Amino acid sequence: MGSDTIGLGFYNVENLFGLEDNGNEYPEFRPGAFGWNKQMYDIKVGRIASVIAAMHLDVIGLSEVQDRNTLQELQGELQKRGVDYPYSAIADEPVRPVNCPALLSRFPIVESHGFRSFSLRPTRNLLEADLDCNGARLRVYVNHWPSKFQPESERLAAAQALAQRIAQRGPGVPYVIIGDLNSDYDEWRTFRTRGFDDTKGVTGLNNVLGTIRSDSTGRFTFVTKGDLCRGGRIFHFDPWLDVPLEKRMSMIFHGLPETPDHILLPRALLCGTTFTYCDSSFTAFNWDGRLLRGGEPFGWQMRGFGRRRFFTGEGYSDHLPVYLRLVERPEAPPALPPDTATAPAKAAPLQRGGFEESDEGWLATGSAFTVMRDSTGAASGRYCLCVKGEAPVKNCAAAYTVIRRPALNRSRWSRVAFDIRGGGKIQLRMKSGRGKWRFYSGPRFRYYRSSRYLLSRFPSWRHVAISFLADNTASPDLIVELCAGKGEPLCVWLDNFVVE
C-alpha cells in the first residue's frame, strides 16, 4: 500500500460475544451453554483477528460485537499478531443493544458518537466517528440495520436517521457510509417480491441514501460516478457496481447470493480534493478461498440438534468482509475546456512514461474525465497514471498526450508499448503529424480501420505492444488519445508508456 492510500473496510463478524453473562446475549452464547466457554471464545476471537490481519487495512468497521470489553480483547489479539489498531470506538449507547457496530483504526479517532433510528421498534445504534488521517479529517458512519425478518419500514427508519445526521453535520468533512445494511445493492428491484414492502416501493438504501435516481422518463437507474461529479442533491455511489455481476456476493441466503454489506461513497470521495476512491478497488475479501465453504461464506459452525447443539470451533462468519482504497489528496491537473480538447500540440511531448516525476504530459479532454498521477499499485516504480470518468453523451476521447518519436525511428514502424489495468469501453487511437487516425480497441488492442469500443476488463496489469506505421515521416510527434465508449464508466491505470 502506498503511503498516500487508505485501506478501509467492513466486516460483520457474526456474533462476537464475550464471556460476561449480562443477560443481553443470545441463548447459545451464554457462558457454559452449547459449549460456549473460554476455549471456544479464544478460537472465535483468533479466527476473526486472522481475517482482519490478512486484509492489511488502515480502518475497519465491525458489526455484531457484544461490547467494549470484547472489542478490546480483539484489539489485543490483533496486536499479538503484529497488527496494531491503537484506536477504537463502539456504539454501545444511547440504548444497550444485543450487539454493536464498532470501529478499529490506525488513525486517531478525534470523536465518536452513537445514535439511533426513529423506529417504534428498538433497533441497533449507529456509529459516527471522525478520524484524523495524517492531518485530514474523514468521518465514518458504521451501520447494522434491522434484518430481513423485519419489514422495509424498519430499514427505512435507519436510513432516514443516518441521512438526517449527515445533513445536520454539514458538508465540511468528507464521509463514508459502511455497514451491514441488510439490503442488496438493487433492493429497489427485488424486495417487493419477498414480502418486505410496507413502504410502497421506497427503500432505505436506494431511495433515502440515493444510490438510484430517476431519469427524464421517470424510470430509476443506478447513480454513477459521473452523476455524482455533476453535483445536485445528496446521492451516493455503491461500488458493488464496479464488481462483475457474477461476483457480487458477500452473503448467501436461502441459496441466493446477496450484497448486504456496503461502502457507500458521496460526491466528496469521487471528485473532492482531500480523499478519492481508487476506482475498481472495491471487493469482497475471501482470503484466497479460506473464508468460503462450498462457495458460501464459511460461517461460525454449530453441530447437533436442539439442546444438543454445540460449537465446533470451525468457521469465521456468515458474511464476507468488503473493502476499498482511498487516495489522499490526489493531484489532478486542470482539465482542458471541451472546445480546446482537440489541440494536442499544447501537450508537452514525452519519450517515456514511467510517471515517477510527473503525469508525463497527459491531459484530460474535458470536465467529464480526470487524469492524475497515482501510487495505487504501480506496475513498476512507485507511480502510475489514472484516467477515469464517463462519456457524457457519446463516445469520446478521455485523455491524450504527444509522444516524441526517436529520431532514428521516424521513417519506419514504431513500437508503442504500455502496461494497463482497470476497465471500460476502451479504444486507443494514434496518428503522426497530419496523418490519419489508426484505431486499436481493447481488450486485445487489435488494429481497426474505424472506431470500435469494446468492453475490456484488466483486473491485473497487462502488457500491451502495438506496431504503428507513421503516415507522415517528417513529423517527430505521435499523437495518442485514450478514448471511452458511452454507457460504461472508464477507469484505467497506465504505466511504462513508451514508443521505440
Image (tube, helix red, strand yellow):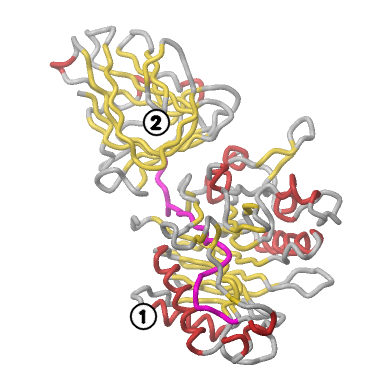
On whether residue 156 falls in the magenta region, the answer is no
Q: What residue is rendered at 51% in x and 70% in y? A: 316
- Which residue has dot 1 on it? 80
The residue identified by callout 2 is: 363
Q: Secondary structure at mark 1?
A: helix
Q: Determine whether, in the image, residue 244 is placed left or right of residue 467.
A: right
Kind of residue at badge 1:
Lys
Say few, some or many: other residues with alpha carbon within 10 Å of mark 1 (under 14 / 14 to 19 / 20 or more): few
- Nearest the viewer among 150 and 265 is 150
Which region is colored magenta? 310-333
How far from the left and from the top, in percent, is residue 382?
Answer: 28, 48
Left or right: residue 218 compared with residue 261 = right
Q: Sequence order check: which comes first, mark 1 or mark 2?
A: 1
Q: Nearer the viewer, residue 145 or 291?
A: 291
Amino acid type at circle 2 is: Leu
316 or 447: nearer the eye? Answer: 316
Q: Residue 446, position in %: x, y? A: 37, 20
Tell me residue 396's x, y (percent).
50, 22
Asked if disc 1 and disc 2 are in contact, CB closer than 8 Å, the reply is no
Residue at horizontal 36 percent and vertical 39 percent from the top:
385
- State the residue at coordinates (44%, 58%): 289
187 shown above or below 473: below
Q: Is residue 333 visible?
A: no
- For residue 418, which quarter of the picture? top left
Identify which residue, 162 or 192, lies in the foreground.
192
The crowd level at tag 2 (other Cα within 10 Å; few <14, some 14-19, many 20+) is many
Disc number for residue 59: none
Marks 1 and 2 sit apart, C-alpha to C-alpha, by 48 Å
Quadrant of the image occupied by residue 471: top left
The residue mark sitting in front, 1 or 2, is: 1
- The kind of secondary structure the magenta stretch mainly shows is loop
